[in-house]
Amino acid sequence: MASLGKPIPSVTPDMAGFFEGARRGQLMVERCDHCGTLRFPAHELCAKCLATGAKWVPVSGRGEIYSFNIMHQIYHPGFAGEVPYAVIVVKLEEGPKFISNLVGIKPHEIRIGMPVEVAFERLSDEVMIPKFRPRAHA
Amino acid sequence: MSNDLRAKCAIAGLGQTRMGKNFDHPNAMGFAAEAIELALEDAGLARSDLDGLLVNPGVTWMENAMASFTLQQAMGLTDLTLTATMNLGGATAGAMIMHATQAIAAGMANVVACVFADAPLRAPSPDKAKAGGGSAAAYGFARGLNAHYGQFGVNAGYAFVAQRHMHLYGTRQEHLGEIAVAERRWANLNPAAQFHDTPMTMADYNAARWVVEPFHLYDCCLVSNGGLAVIVTSAERAKSLKHPPVYLLGMGQGHPGGDPMDTLVSGAPLAKKSAFKMAGIELKDINFAELYDCYTFTVLITLEDYGFCKKGEGGPFVAGGRIGPQGSLPVNTGGGQLSSFYMWGMTPVAEAIVQMRGEAGARQVPRHDIGLVSGNGGILSTHSTLVLGASA
């Protein structure tokens, strides 16, 4: 079900690989061609080795809650019906952090360290985006 | 070598406009000019004495890339030998003062004005147009995916860091509340504070609306229109002017990089090294501290990072009113940015000057020989430390 009224991310060329993976239900991050360091979102440079050049690679979609907040203030009308809602930071198994929302659980039930897994949501014909849901076991 | 700059320069003038819902000027630049005029008058100097101008533009004129030049022209200043438009967020005030000190000590300038100004609040209009949302609107930008997930603004990013600290160290909501309540008690003693007339108990703090958990309304700084300027000169020149000089004894910066969610550390430990060494002081020599307080949480982290307590113990440290009036470590003695006014890094600088001069009236701390001033920008991204002294 589309999240009506919220800003729809535009698919910029540097993020095309991510959204292609998302359409296939696959979570992707960038891997530096030179040193293999993983990063998200797309960057021109690798912060580790300063090389340009990276490929989008799939990751497992598993991680744990590294941090979260609960937003009460309405910054955008698309969220007027949702406050209070939580924004989470997932530390993926492979290392990079990913900001997202958690589905299937109330904001005040979220705990740092909870294992989670990716669950894609369709926003439009072109755009599917990752959210996360609690995972049964670590 | 590292204490060559110690006490070479002093703050000789302080100019502070009325703060808060001040609509005297149509834009921030007007407040900047007024603050500089007030600072010159405070020092007993004239516009023609100025040969340096350093400007930290607030959010409403941040896109003015050469604000120092725009302001120079607006104020009719000529033959300046030092100017810059600087932005390290809340660390800029300290960084401007350091830059001025280095230039004066090098013989490149003599009298340098350092100014911050902003005007995010719009005057209420007769047709009831929507009022400006202050810092919430100004910082409410979000890009790409984050906007879809509802992650907007600095509050939300800071909240991630605070939640990790609470998870790892057991820091509790009431610890943040202690900081808010202590600063409000100081503000109640400060006639220039926006919350001067409004006391706040812990119950009031808890009852206030959430902004983004774990931050209530009073965990977050105010929004203010206004301008604040200081005049930096050589120590010798300062001695000949109107007020007792506030000497710059130690200076340092710290910009850790990486992810503050991982480290839970500001730039204070890094900045402290050069600042304390230059000043020749230890922590126990500090009589009061004016610590950058965009959030209650920022004060807590900064106290840990300077070493007033161990990492993770900032919560218990502030409990029991330790940093409030009559406490053993006076912190943010004018009410800070939580309860007096939000002039970024100039808020703690201004209060330190007033305390150091012994002019703080009802809120005067009894010992004011050595003061510590911090500035913080971004989300524990940038940091400046100044050690100020009443004598050279």
Image: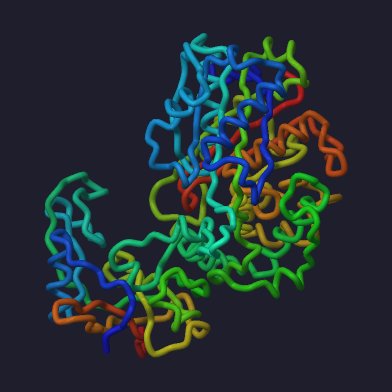
Q: Where does residue B163 sit, x and y in percent of width and height?
A: 53, 68
Q: Where does residue B21 sit, x and y in percent of width and height?
A: 64, 51
- Between residue B351 and residue B165, name the one nearer to us: B351
- Between residue A36 and residue B18, name the one nearer to us: B18
Whether B330 is drawn above or below A126: the answer is above
Residue B364 lies left or right of residue B78; in this view the side is right
Residue B59 in sight: yes
Residue B358 lies left or right of residue A1; in this view the side is right
The residue lying at 44 percent from left, 45 percent from top is B256
Q: Where does residue B198 sit, x and y in percent of width and height?
A: 79, 60
- Between residue A90 and residue B71, name the one nearer to us: B71
Whether A57 is drawn above or below B2: the answer is below
The residue lying at 43 percent from left, 42 percent from top is B62
Whether B391 is drawn above or below A54: the answer is above
Q: Quadrant of residue B345?
A: top right
Residue B124 lies left or right of residue A24; in this view the side is right
Q: Quadrant of residue B49?
A: top right
Q: Quadrant of the C terminus of chain B?
A: top right
Report how many numbered discs are placed on residues in the image: 0
Q: Where does residue A33 sit, x and y in percent of width and height?
A: 12, 54
Whether B75 is drawn above or below A138: the answer is above
The residue lying at 25 percent from left, 61 percent from top is A41
